[in-house]
Image (cartoon, helix red, strand yellow):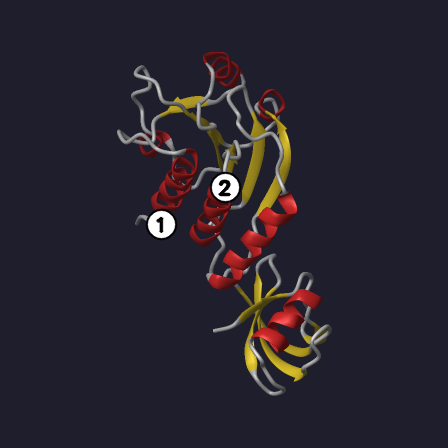
Amino acid sequence: MNVFYIPNAIEGLTTLPEDESKHCVKVLRMTEGERFCVTDGVGSLYDAELVEALPKRATVQLSNKRKGYDHWGFQLVIAIAPTKLNDRTEWFLEKATEIGIDRVQLFTSYHSERRAANVERFQKVMVAAMKQSIKSRLPHIDDLEPFEKLVKQPFDGQKFIAWIDDNVKECLCDLYQKGQNVLVLIGPEGDFSPEEVALAKENGFVPVSLGDARLRTETAAIVACHTIQLINQMK
């Protein structure tokens, strides 16, 4: 099924954004009368029919507004230090969107190898993943901010910091409580410094392990995301 994204969509006649119109008419070569699905990125899906196949402003008829399947009763937030190679961060964003996540917070820390982020590009990756997995909700992504500022922000839920250390014995899967809002910090390639872990603990974060395997930053973030979703989907 072809899925297109229209922010603030409503039932009735409307137009696809220019980039979506181009993809619909020029790339997929869709013609008047063809049907597809539209997501508004904030929780709803629509049936859509192409009314006028214009490559810059395609007109569509939206109907049958319905709630998407990707709703849950908790908030899942992953805070991650962007990787040196952008494609690894993009891979995480793509897969986390497919698995299900509410928010991604980007931060810089002592061992960060990347201190700039193209958030606009990252968001496009998440939009594509949302459409590919027929999601109705587009995760929010925040611009880079210092680790010291991030950990001091209020958060109503459980807070964890994934840290590779021999003294960290408790696993995320054992400490997270089903149904609770959760924020998990994932460090850069060089991991967190001891001072950063101490600061996080002072602000209510609990150090946790993600298992015995040594994971890359983007893999650790995916493991954390999937662990939380899997716990919440268990009967």
Depth check: 8 or 36 in front? 36
Q: Are marks 2 and 1 in contact (CB under 8 Å)?
A: no
* Res. 50 in view: yes
Q: Residue at x 65, y 71 (%)?
A: 22
Q: Residue at x 53, y 27 (%)?
A: 113
Label 2's element? helix
User: Farthest left residue?
Assistant: 212
Label 1's element? helix
Q: Residue at x 71, y 79 (%)?
A: 54
Label ID, residue 233:
1
- What residue does disc 2 label? 89
- Amino acid identity at mark 1: Gln
Corner quadrant of residue 154: top right
- For label 1, the crowd category at 10 Å Cα-Cα, with few meaning under 14, some 14 to 19 and many 20 or more, is few
Corner quadrant of residue 178: top left
Left/right of residue 131 with respect to residue 153 in the rendered view: left
Depth check: 24 or 8 in front? 24
Q: Residue at x 36, y 22 (%)?
A: 164
Q: CA distance from mark 2 to mark 1?
A: 26 Å
In the image, residue 143 above or below residue 232: above
